[in-house]
Image: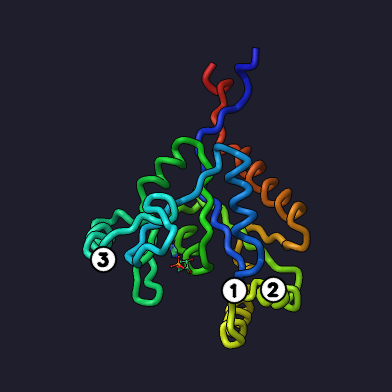
């Protein structure tokens, strides 16, 4: 008989932030690939679809009118305007996934992460991923070969700004070695899932 084993009652949002070039996307993708209870949040945007993007997979692409209507109806968990386009997280799929005991990974900037934490409180766990050093971050960004010298400078100063915010997160992980950082991130997910308020006890109702 195993009827005393606790069941997961409530999932949570895992809000992960990091300067670009830190390996955040690969870490989050691996979590979702390895565990079916870990899912991604699909944002909504008013920006045009890029080649190869799939609606409902990369983003949900909607018109500005539709987006603003949803925003004023209170259907969005959080929104942000970036380069004149709207982005946001629809509330219902996140709430439903939390109730189903899922872990919803959000790859999100520092402003968005603090907004989500303020709204969801205990239903959100914040994690910041640090690069091993500035020199290493610069080397990684350069080796991608995607940025002009000006963009590189901008990204590095943006990284410094974001890193100053890292102390406000609940967890901080350094990504010196991918598999070690992954084990630490997975450890946070597994530990958070066992928090007493997220667990349903069968023995409390014999
Ligand atoms: P892109 O257009 O390149 O896909 O994304 C542009 C920016 O929008 C990125 O910085 C990305 O993190 C941000 N973004 C994407 N989805 C959301 C969202 O749901 N909420 C917020 N606050 N920012 C988002």
Viewer-nearest of labels 2 and 3? 2
Q: Is residue 122 visible?
A: no
Residue 30 or 49: which is nearer the viewer?
49
Neighbourhood count class around disc 1 (C-alpha, 10 Å): few under 14, some 14–19, many 20 upward: some
Which label is found at residue 143? 2
- Give the percent coordinates (x, y) of residue 47: 35, 67
**Ligand 1 shown in quarter:** bottom left
Neighbourhood count class around disc 2 (C-alpha, 10 Å): few under 14, some 14–19, many 20 upward: few
| Among the two numbered marks 2 and 3 on one chain, the one whose residue lies closer to the N terminus | 3
The residue furthest front is 51
| Residue at figure coordinates x 37%, y 72% from the top left | 81
Q: Is mark 1 within 8 Å of ligand 1?
A: no
| Residue at figure coordinates x 66%, y 43% from the top left | 191
- The residue where tag 3 is placed is 64
Horizontal side of 84 relative to 9 (left or right) equals left
Quadrant housing the C terminus: top right
- Give the percent coordinates (x, y) of residue 93: 39, 45
- The residue where tag 1 is placed is 162
- Separation of disc 1 and disc 3 at Cα? 29 Å
Q: Is mark 3 within 8 Å of ligand 1?
A: no
Q: Residue 162 occupies which quadrant of the picture?
A: bottom right
Secondary structure under the numbered disc 2 in the rendered image:
helix
Neighbourhood count class around disc 3 (C-alpha, 10 Å): few under 14, some 14–19, many 20 upward: some
- Give the percent coordinates (x, y) of residue 176: 77, 63
Q: So how many labels did they put on this image?
A: 3
| Residue at figure coordinates x 54%, y 56% from the top left | 15
Secondary structure under the numbered disc 3 in the rendered image:
helix
């Amino acid at each position: 008989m195993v009827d005393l084993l606790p069941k997961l009652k409530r999932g949570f949002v895992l809000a992960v932030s990091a300067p670009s070039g830190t390996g955040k996307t690969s870490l989050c993708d691996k979590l979702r690939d390895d565990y079916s209870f870990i899912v991604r949040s699909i944002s909504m945007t008013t920006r045009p679809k890029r080649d190869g993007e799939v609606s409902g997979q990369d983003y949900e692409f909607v018109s500005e009118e539709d987006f603003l209507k949803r925003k004023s109806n209170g259907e969005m968990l959080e929104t942000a305007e970036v380069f004149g386009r709207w982005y946001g997280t629809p509330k219902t799929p996140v709430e439903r996934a939390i109730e189903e005991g899922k872990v919803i990974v959000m790859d999100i900037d520092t402003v968005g992460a603090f907004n989500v934490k303020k709204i969801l409180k205990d239903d959100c766990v914040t994690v910041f991923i640090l690069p091993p050093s500035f020199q290493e971050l610069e080397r990684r960004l350069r080796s991608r070969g995607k940025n002009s010298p000006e963009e590189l400078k901008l990204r590095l100063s943006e990284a410094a700004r974001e890193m100053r915010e890292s102390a406000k997160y609940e967890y901080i992980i350094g990504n010196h070695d991918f598999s070690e950082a992954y084990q630490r991130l997975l450890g946070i997910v597994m530990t958070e899932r066992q928090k007493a308020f997220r667990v349903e006890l069968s023995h409390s109702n014999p």
